[in-house]
Amino acid sequence: MIRVTLRGVTWPAVLGGSAFGAGILAVCVAYAAGGPPLMYVRLALVALVAAAAFVLDEPAAAAVDAVPATRRRRTAVRASAVALPLAVWTAGILALERRNNVTAVAALLVEGAGLLAVAVALSAILRLTGRAEPGEIVASALGASMLAVLIFNPSPGSVPLFPVGDGWAASTAIWCSLAVTALMLVVAVSHDPYRRRERKPFVLRDRPK
C-alpha cells in the first residue's frame, strides 16, 4: 500500500521544485563569503514550499478512495515526500553555515520546516473541500505571499516572519507555533469523507400458517 500511495505523488512537481530550490541554494553558498544572502536563500525556500504543496495531490481521487486504506493513512504516507524539500533546505542551510559561520542555522531551519508544514496543511484543508489536486493553488498563493513579504520588506515594527538582522528569536517562536498548528490541522482534516449507508427496505414477511 505504501509503495502504491507514494507512486501516486505528483513527483514531477515535487522533484522540479526541490531541484530548483537546490540550484538557488548552491549559488547562495558560492556567494556567501561576505554573509548569507538571505533574500536569495528565501527565494529557494519559495520553490521548496511550492514542491511541498503538491505532495497531497490525488489525480485519481475516485480510484484512490476505493482502496481499503483510510485518508489519514494515505496522508501520512504522502506527507513523507516532504522529506525531500526539507532535506534540500537542511543541506543548503548547513552548507551556508560552513561557508559563513554567522548564519542563523537553527532559526532558518525552523523557518523552513514551518513553511513546509503550512504548505501541506493548506493543501489538506483544500482537499477536504473536495479539491483532489490542491497543490497548484497552494503553491501559487503561498509563493506569491512569500514573495510579497520579501519584496516589499515590511516595517521593523511588524511581525518578524523573515528577519535579516534582529528578530530571530521571535521568528523562531512564530514558525514553531505555526508548524505545530499545521501538523494538528493536517491530522484533523484528513478524515475520510462521510458516506451515508443505504438502508435496505423493510419487507414484511407473511407468517407461516
Image (cartoon, grey):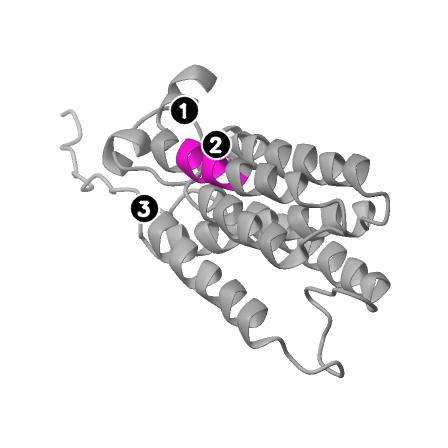
- Which sits earlier in the primary sequence, circle 3 or circle 2? 2
Q: Position of residue 7 (x, y in %)?
A: 37, 21
Q: CA distance from mark 3 to mark 2?
A: 13 Å
Question: Which residue: 85% across, 49% down?
Answer: 102
> Which range is magenta?
14-21
Q: CA distance from mark 1 to mark 3?
A: 15 Å
Taking depth in this image into account, of 207 and 90 the one nearest to the observer is 90
Q: Are marks 1 and 2 in contact (CB under 8 Å)?
A: yes
- 7 falls in the magenta region: no
- Which sits earlier in the primary sequence, circle 1 or circle 3? 1
Label 3 SS: loop
Q: Callout 1: few (<14), some (14-19), or many (20+) C-alpha neighbours within 10 Å? A: some
Q: Is residue 162 left or right of residue 44?
A: right
Q: Amino acid at mark 1?
A: Thr
Q: Which mark is residue 110?
A: none
Which residue corresponds to mark 3? Answer: 133
Q: Position of residue 83 (x, y in %)?
A: 59, 31
Question: Which residue: 53% across, 63% down?
Answer: 146
Label 2 SS: helix
Q: Position of residue 116 (x, y in %)?
A: 58, 47
Q: Callout 2: few (<14), some (14-19), or many (20+) C-alpha neighbours within 10 Å? A: many
Q: CA distance from mark 1 to mark 2?
A: 7 Å
Which residue corresponds to mark 1? Answer: 5
- 17 falls in the magenta region: yes
Q: Is residue 24 left or right of residue 15?
A: right
Which residue corresponds to mark 2? Answer: 78
User: In the rendered image, is residue 155 in sight?
Assistant: yes
Question: Which residue: 55% across, 76% down?
Answer: 152
Taking depth in this image into account, of 107 and 27 the one nearest to the observer is 27
- Which sits earlier in the primary sequence, circle 1 or circle 2? 1
Q: Amino acid at mark 2?
A: Arg
